[in-house]
Amino acid sequence: MLDLDPAAIRDIDPAADVRAALSERIRAALQGGNGTARIERVSVSVPESVPLIDWMRAQTLAETAYWSGREDARRVAAVGAADVISSTAAPVDYGGLGSALGERLDNAERTIRYYGGVRFDAAQPSATDRPDRRWAPFGTYRFVLPRFELVATDGGLRLACNLVRPRDTGRQAAILDRLDALALPAPEARTPLPRPYHRQDVPDHDGWTHMVRWALEAIDGNALDKVVLARRVALALRDAMDPLLVLNHLESATPGCYHFALRPVDGPAFVGASPERLFRREGRTVVSEAVAGTRPRGETEEEDEALRNELLQSPKERREHAFVEDTIRSDLERVCVSVQRPNGRGELALARGRHLHSRLTGTLRPDTATTDLLKVLHPTPAVGGVPTENAVAAIRAQEPFDRGWYAGPVGWVGRDVAEFAVGLRAGLVEQKQIALFSGAGIVEGSTPDREWDEIEQKIGDFAAIMGVVGADTASG
């Protein structure tokens, strides 16, 4: 049995039985199949509790991925890569990506999932006049089939290995060596995060004011109905920090969100707690959401209720939400035979904030690929604007930094199933640097100061766990 008593770890390897059982299944899988092409998954039960993020932090394999759905009890921590589908070309060839995923998943077990995402501006490999080298390892898209996964569900904990036959048949020894090196650690004490010693906002307050006023003039001139403008908050640390430690603190501070971490080999980690679903697909059923408008939570029940009513009744917020919902409905109708809104407009309440929210469901046309949904839905007006092409062009021209994967689709793809969040409330973590990203929708009635404050509220989750001070009082 797996014994995770810290006292016993000093004398024996508590994971030996688990690794031995999985090793036997790997050998059996690779020795069978008669050379046929297939992606197979083998797994064994882990009889004791192992914290998933601590397990990831204990491994030596550089490629890591973490996914926890907003409403799904299934949580996945993954290390290593059995297969990678990626590109640095732009614009994204969604047809080619769909063919590559389809070719593999058609010959895969239904439990197989590729984890990854796509750049926000999928038409460009990088912002041409302000590239950020840190985004380079992510490419314009990158989807990874992990080598090893630790999966937690209501049914317990399992350690899995994904195998690509016949290619992995000749790699059996290397795979088993990697398995032998896997740790199943005891729970660790929560390590505090270092406090940043310097903060830089890009753009700064003056630059933000100029950018928002430009957008309002474009809206007044009917070139735009809405544009979502973002800021990057760069934090400097005195010591290097494990990005998965950030995820550990962030997950506990942000219930009701998608939690993700993606770290390619030789790259930083993209870590986030997104409240927003782009879509979930199950067979021919697709569910998407319109999320827009923001208010904080109140300190008292009375204040909280007042803020809720203010959000629900605000003409400016309702107008912004209508842009998002109408566009998503129109986009879904391009790939669906029918689209419905089963419930009316309500709120999406989070620990530190709330948003206007509505859900749309559709029945997909036959032969619709998951990548078709990515192509038609991204970017939604919640992260781009209306009209979409004009808004993305404005973002490209006005924002003085490279969004990279911020506000792009982040999630997983299986055979006729998939789920993607929008990569919001997110940060790029690399050694002694953290870059936080957040945006605000600019519509008629927006003001620079109010939208600046909205972004401060949105980065509040990261700010709370990092001890970040406001931009106007940040120390140098």
Image (cartoon, rainbow, N blue to C red):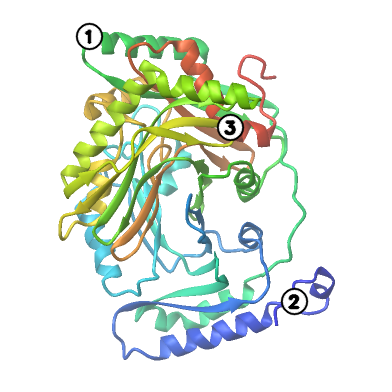
Q: What separation in Å lies between label 2 and label 3 (alpha carbons)?
A: 38 Å
Q: Which of marks 2 and 1 is nearer the N terminus?
A: 2
Q: Which amino acid does label 1 sit on?
A: Gly
Q: What separation in Å lies between label 2 and label 1 (alpha carbons)?
A: 68 Å
Q: Which amino acid does label 3 sit on?
A: Arg
Q: How crowded is mark 2: few (under 14 residues within 10 Å), some or many (20 or more)?
A: some
Residue 32 appears in view: yes
The quarter of the rendered structure image containing the N terminus is bottom right
Residue 352 circle label: 3
Q: Earlier in the sequence, mark 3 or mark 1?
A: 1
Residue annotated with mark 2: 3
Question: Is residue 441 or residue 233 the one in the foreground?
Answer: 441
Q: What separation in Å lies between label 3 and label 1 (alpha carbons)?
A: 35 Å
Question: Is residue 14 or residue 181 the one in the foreground?
Answer: 14
Q: How crowded is mark 3: few (under 14 residues within 10 Å), some or many (20 or more)?
A: some
Q: Is residue 98 left or right of residue 206?
A: left
Residue 189, position as x, y percentages in the image: 77, 54
Q: Which residue is drawn at 26% across and 56% down?
A: 285
Picture mark count: 3
Q: Does dot 1 land on a helix, a strand or a loop?
A: loop
Residue 178 location, quadrant: bottom right
Residue 221 circle label: 1
- Mark 3 vs mark 1, foreground winner is 3
Residue 248, position as x, y percentages in the image: 64, 49
Residue 97 location, quadrant: bottom left
Q: Pointer 2 and pointer 3: residues touching (CB < 8 Å)?
A: no
Q: Does dot 3 land on a helix, a strand or a loop?
A: loop
Q: Which of marks 2 and 3 is nearer the N terminus?
A: 2
